[in-house]
Image (spheres, grey):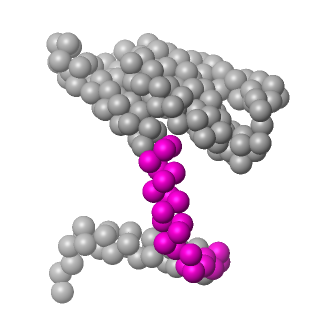
Amino acid sequence: IECNPMSIMWVILLSTQLIVFTYVLYRIKPSFSNILGRIKEIFAFNKEFGFKIYVGNLFSTAVSALLPLLIGFVSENNSEVGFYALALSFAHIISFCPIVIATSHYKKFAEYDKIPNKIMLATIGITMFALLCLCILIGPFITIFYSEEFQPVIQLSYITGIGATLYGLSDFFSRYFMAKGNGDFLRNSSFLVGFCT
């Protein structure tokens, strides 16, 4: 029997997800005794808090997706879009540094009146170090692994690196406000991120 490779990939993907999902359910042993009450709570919370975040994220994501189209529209050819996408993929790693720190402290953020200086300085320091590493290493990396035509990616990586740094730090603060349940601020900050993109 001849098998379609795409079908095999779907079977593997769905099977692994099913195995993980079953294992998680087995380990946490959830109780479904008050499921209707919990669903009502989720809808009420989503109406007050979640929808505001959704609107802000929708705007921010839409603007980010529109940016390559705008670059392609104003450039002479589509090579600039490729350069931008490559530079963004290198720089995007920087934004993970503050996001990981914020995620690991998310539970504690709900208890803090303000973000402790130690966490703030560590986050800024690690993120700036990642930006410095990008600025130092991107030139030799592009020169060694790419041809001469890709040299514009170096300059673009500096710019996208600064953008990724600001994006990651803003997401760090957004997670703090998310833990505090401030949906209005999150929506407005997503609008700001969209405009700045």
Residue 56, percent from left and from top: 41, 33
Work out whether residue 93 can be spotted.
no
Would residue 37 be seen by someone viewing this image from the given angle?
yes
Is 59 above or below relative to 26?
A: above
Residue in the picture at 44% in, 48% down: 47
Up/down of 65 relative to 76, above or below: below
Q: Magenta span covers which residues?
A: 27-50
Quarter placement of the N terminus: bottom left
Tell me: residue 62, above or below residue 17: above
Q: Main secondary structure of the magenta part?
A: helix
Q: Position of residue 125 (x, y in %)?
A: 73, 23
Q: Position of residue 151 (x, y in %)?
A: 38, 16
Residue at image location 65% in from the left, 39% down from the top: 180
Q: Is residue 143 magenta?
A: no
Q: Is residue 93 left or right of residue 66?
A: right
Name the residue at the bottom extreme. Answer: 1
Q: Which is more toward the observer, 180 or 47?
A: 47
Which residue is located at x 49 percent, y 44 percent?
Answer: 48
Q: Is residue 77 left or right of residue 61?
A: left
Does residue 35 show up magenta in the picture? yes
- Comparing 62 with 45, the one in front is 45
Q: Quadrant of the C terminus?
A: top left
